[in-house]
Amino acid sequence: MPQMKETDFKKHMEGGGLSGLYLLYGEEKYLVRRYAKRLLRKASAGDPFPDFNFQRFDGSASPDEVAAAVTALPFMGERKCVAVTDLAPDFLRAGDLAKWQELIANVPETTVLVIYQPNTTPEKKAAKWNAFLKQASKYGRTVSFARREGAELEKWICGEAAKKKCTLGRREARKLIELSGSDMQSLHNEVEKLCAFAGEGEITGEIVERMASRRTETTVYMLSRALVAGEYSRAYNLLDQMFYQNEEPVAILAVLASAFVDMYRVRSAIQSGAAASSLAKSFAGEYKGREWRLRNAEQAIRGLSTGQLRQILEELLQTDLALKSSKTSSRVLLEEMIARIMVITAKSGKGLR
């Protein structure tokens, strides 16, 4: 049968009548885990002997072991449930893959077989995975959970806060995504923390700014803003913070370079008469769901010329080469780079603070 959408799968679970194979996978692991847990709970609901009628395997289990569990009759119950986590068809031998394909084609109506991937993501173009997925789609129900983004993700965050009897607006949800990233498990944890702090009240932008955990990417983007604004002390404090957190110097530089590449692209787009937002289509792979990078870049470049941005990109390139070839301390190289970029941005008239 064709792949199910998330909304259809939710209705299917609520309608009961669960049986056969279910394959849950995708990039958004939070949703894979949540729906697998809900499906397994529904499938086992009302079972007087759950210890006998529920078996769990990890991806290393042999197809013969799983087949024995799947084909066994339920013990004094309506059905039995078998769960398999993180099965990796790409790494199966041809003989084992054939056994799995035979198994999923013959799941009894008295068994619910749930294969889900809470930690692994299959390579979409891999031949073995595609053969497995085709067979699973033919004989069972498959659901792929993509990452949520934009307005959909903001709405979900607001809903999670509402469950805790807290009020969190769209603007604050957007700010939380910018600071903590778009991973739903991380955002779920952040909302719980913010609600615990706010009680049953409003989660303001100030609370989000103060309490939200920042990704390395966010901290580096804050560093780029400090450099552009000529905030000397803040720039070095942010660098101190990242070294304290044992962030890799090469990773810090890579994200910083991305921030200034964003600025250069936005400056070029504006000079050619296009809107900064148009870059989201031209570079969809980079900016889809991350349009905030373009908004930040557009704000940051005010007062900076194209020539200054080129000079900064050259400094970043030279520092990258030095990090990979020089015996000088990585920290010293980054601190010297910050000083040189500050000199460049000071020419915009902002000065050093």
Image (spheres, grey):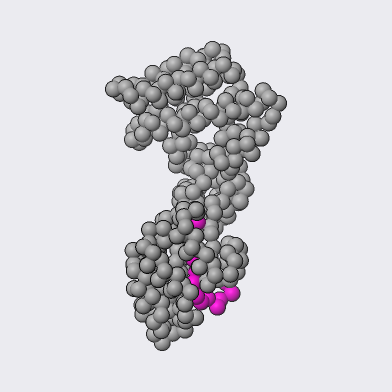
Q: Which is nearer the eye, 275 or 69?
A: 69
Work out which quarter of the rendered image holds the N terminus and state it.
bottom right
User: Which of the 4 image quadrants contains residue 235?
Assistant: top left
Q: Report the label total.
A: 0
Can residue 245 be seen at all in this image of the molecule? yes
User: Which of the 4 image quadrants contains residue 62?
Assistant: bottom left
Q: Position of residue 220 (x, y in %)?
A: 46, 31
Q: Position of residue 181 (x, y in %)?
A: 50, 43
Q: Which is nearer the eye, 161 or 145?
A: 145
Q: Which residues are magenta?
A: 14-26
Within the magenta stretch, is there residue 341?
Answer: no
Can residue 30 be seen at all in this image of the molecule? no
User: Who's the residue at 42% across and 55% down the image?
Assistant: 120
| Residue 242 located left or right of residue 109 | left
Outermost residue on the right side: it is 273
Q: Position of residue 22 (x, y in %)?
A: 50, 69
For residue 255, above or below residue 66: above
User: Who's the residue at 41% across and 80% down the image?
Assistant: 71
User: Who's the residue at 41% across and 31% down the image?
Assistant: 252
Outermost residue on the bottom side: it is 76
Q: Position of residue 105 (x, y in %)?
A: 48, 74
Within the magenta stretch, is there residue 23?
Answer: yes
Outermost residue on the front side: it is 94
User: Who's the residue at 37% across and 70% down the image?
Assistant: 63
